Amino acid sequence: MEEGHRWVLVKKPCDRDAWSPTLLSSNSGSNSGSDPLKIRFNEPAKYWTDALPIGNGRLGAMVWGGVPAEVLNLNEDTLWTGIPGDYTDPNAPEALAEVRKLVNEGQYAEATSAAAQLSGEPSEVYQPLGDVKIEFDDSHTKYDKESYHRELDLDTATVTVRYSVDEVEFTREHFVSYPDQAIVVKISGNKPGRLNFTASLDSELHHRSYAKGKSQIAMQGSCPGKGIASESLEDDDYPEGIQFSAFLDLQISGSMGTLHVLDDKKLHVEGCDWAIIMLSASSSFDGPFINPSDSQRDPSSEALSTLNSIKRFSYSEVYSRHVSDHQNLFHSVSLQLSKSSKSSIGNGCNLTNNCLAGGQKQSISTADRVKAFKTDEDPSLVELLFQFGRYLLISSSRPGTQASNLQGIWNKDIHPAWDCAPHLNINLQMNYWPSLPCNLKESQEPLFDYISSLSVNGHKTAKVNYQASGWVAHQISDIWAKSSPDFGQPVWALWQMGGAWLCTHLWEHYTYTVDKDFLRNKAYPLLEGCAAFLLDWLIEGPEGYLGTNPSTSPEHNFTAPDGKPASVSNTSTMDMAITREVFSAIVSAAEVLDKSKDILIERVRKAQQRLYPTKISTDGTIMEWAKDFKDPEVHHRHLSHLFGLFPGHTITLQKTPDLCKAAEKSLQKRGIEGPGWSTTWKTALWARLHNSEHAYEMVKHLFDLVDPENPRSFEGGLYSNLFAAHPPFQIDANFGFSAALAEMLVQSTMQELYLLPALPRDKWDSGCVKGLKARGGVTVSMCWSGGELDEVGLWSEDHNVTKRLHYGGTSVTTTLSCGTVYTFNKHLQCVRSHALE
């Protein structure tokens, strides 16, 4: 690999480029009306949440940008503690019978205590791979701080660091290539022979690091075979965990400079023009059902093979392949938002309006922009956060990788918050909310693979624990597809709806893509197993309705009629909402696949009519439990009882207006405070109610800069690198924000399409969005000005579709022929059409 000039591959047209408005405006181009999509810093990172994330779905790195010493925190998405487990409990049926008896007797506190017998083992823990450390010569301690600049360019998925030392400008470029499966760093100076540094590779895991030849460092190690230390196990009794290998390859300019081994495990560079570091890594993980001790994979061989493959290309070629691959996904959607000129004038000169010269504007750190948002409400910062969510999804979930976990793929800790484990009662699902509307359907493949694995273990759990058919998964899982309840209190551990909620994503994928093969071969078998479990899990109550027992509303306690705190009762609203969604999905899927007469579908249809209804409390809110229990925490972070509104579809303005009014009162009662993911869920809920004022209030609420030295004083907010905060960092809110913003602009069913349903017209007076997806396989691009729709472009690539369009009180039914782009004006009249290129 040699240094050379960059070149760019010719890429196929993206969805955002398929349509342009009749009258081009300043906000109609892909990026012309907005700031570049960059997260900027004017100093090195002091905290992990100042570092910048790069990734290819499998490999990740956090770039700190230090000058005397650079650190890259490394991750590989299969590095977890543990081994495959037994997720069954033969004693569960007896405990279940006791809990049900107590619930039926109205002894909810006692049922809650007894339900602890249904808990399982803790999930395993996601582990960091290690660190690359690059230590520069002493001159770098005297760098010109005014010259320092660090940025993540979302458009190229590249982190760049620039600074000057003694009139030499040094540049570092960092990216993670999906085509070539490697982390790549290029370091250069603008004057010859001035680059000197030492590179090393280390890990907190059990490992061995050593120099391999004259230009490589090898690191081999293992994850613990058990995540939680057990007093009953001696060190020799711990099972063999996942093995891993990483190789760092270093190349320098050929004309000058030296490279040699230092201390048998470091590489020292002296007097060169440029250097290129490539890192590959692999593990012995061979799926959730194969014990690491039985794995046939050789991580060292795989990692070395990757390095040998990438070295066939020049740096320019590797970089161009990376950018082309990234932009093929990232460029599918563009977004520009603008305030009215009156609003801008009212704000006067501030950090983000055009009073500032271009160079001065680009020197402002993103953290300062977040601080200023409460006053300037800069729409371009909203654009940046929207696209950052899409960037993170591309970077943490690609075909062939693991599903994005609680922190995506980025984690520096041996004992991370909540183990970085997938949480199935909102967090994992929210990670994938933007994948369909935001035109990243490919990112869902790891999720669907994960659901398939969960169903295998979940069949065993359903059969043994609940004596039920089908499959089940609970609240927390891990890389081993843990399907049993978590260890701990029933308020979070005992929840049988995790797998069912995940199954709604399968049907949603079909509604957006109309991919009948996917529905038949992937989705339907999983939906069948899920529906079979739900049918067996449902129990007839005293009123003749079908409900669930035991039941919890995730992580939320209630006060029982006897005044005691409890969490276990029967038939929570969320249980019923998810069940309705799954039953509706499989009945609709059966119609598509000509399976409507199957016995299972007939059973589902009969059960649908008997499901316990969603009820309204005496205070006008939606009841969270089947009984109108007293809520000791009215501002609770979860919005579980509103699942039917979003992401579900059983509460709608058109069909259930009374429930929508109750949902609005429920949101008002919950308030605006809460962790980041709660904030973005509320944004989406308000958007579904077509309430732009409250949806925007929640958007604005998220823009609160979190102090990493005192994070516990915050609820929600953003870190300086735009990671969303619970706190601590959880990635779900980043994804939830992108999905919620898309929901403000476009909403759809298979038949209906709503344009700008929750647009805050006084905040985003003008704008243009291109490439959003709607159900029915329709792509939506549109521009607006003065708070009103100008034009919208609609098309379907491979099938004809009939849609009823809605905007501003006007509704029109239209048929879109495949391969044709149609343009409609604000009156929803078709004004032109052209062939899709």
Image (tube, rainbow, N blue to C red):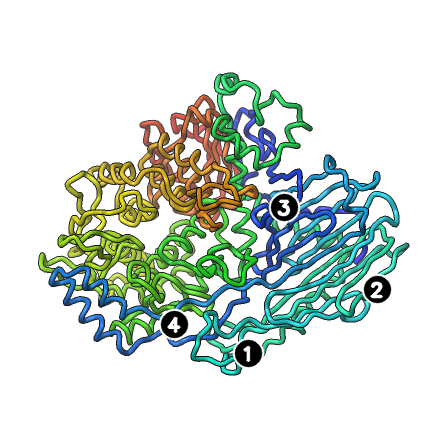
Residue underneath mark 1: 295
Q: Residue 794, position in %: x, y?
A: 45, 38
Q: Residue 409, position in %: x, y?
A: 54, 57
> In front: mark 3 or mark 4?
3
Residue underneath mark 3: 45
> In front: mark 1 or mark 3?
3
Residue type at mark 1: give it: Ser
Q: Mark 2 to mark 4: distance in Å?
A: 51 Å
Name the residue at 66% across, 52% down: 175
Residue underneath mark 4: 456
Residue underneath mark 2: 260
- In the rendered image, which quarter contains the N terminus? bottom right
Looking at the image, residue 388 sits to the left or right of residue 463; the answer is right
Q: Mark 2 to mark 3: distance in Å?
A: 29 Å
> In front: mark 2 or mark 3?
3
> In front: mark 2 or mark 4?
2
Q: Residue 102, position in %: x, y?
A: 15, 65
The answer to the question of whether label 2 and label 3 lie on touching residues, with beta carbons closer than 8 A, is: no
Against 661, is 81 above or below? below
Looking at the image, residue 510 sits to the left or right of residue 410; the answer is left
**Marked residue nearer the N-terminal end (2 or 4):** 2
> In front: mark 1 or mark 4?
1
Name the residue at 41% across, 38% down: 746
Residue type at mark 2: give it: His
**Marked residue nearer the N-terminal end (1 or 4):** 1
Q: Of helix, strand and loop, which one carries label 4?
A: helix
Q: Nearer the viewer, residue 302 or 528?
A: 302
**Marked residue nearer the N-terminal end (2 or 3):** 3
**Marked residue nearer the N-terminal end (1 or 2):** 2
Disc number placed over residue 447 in the picture, else none: none
Structural crowding at the residue carrying mark 4, measured as other residues with C-alpha within 10 Å and reported as few (<14), some (14–19) or many (≥20)? some
Residue 830 quadrant: top left
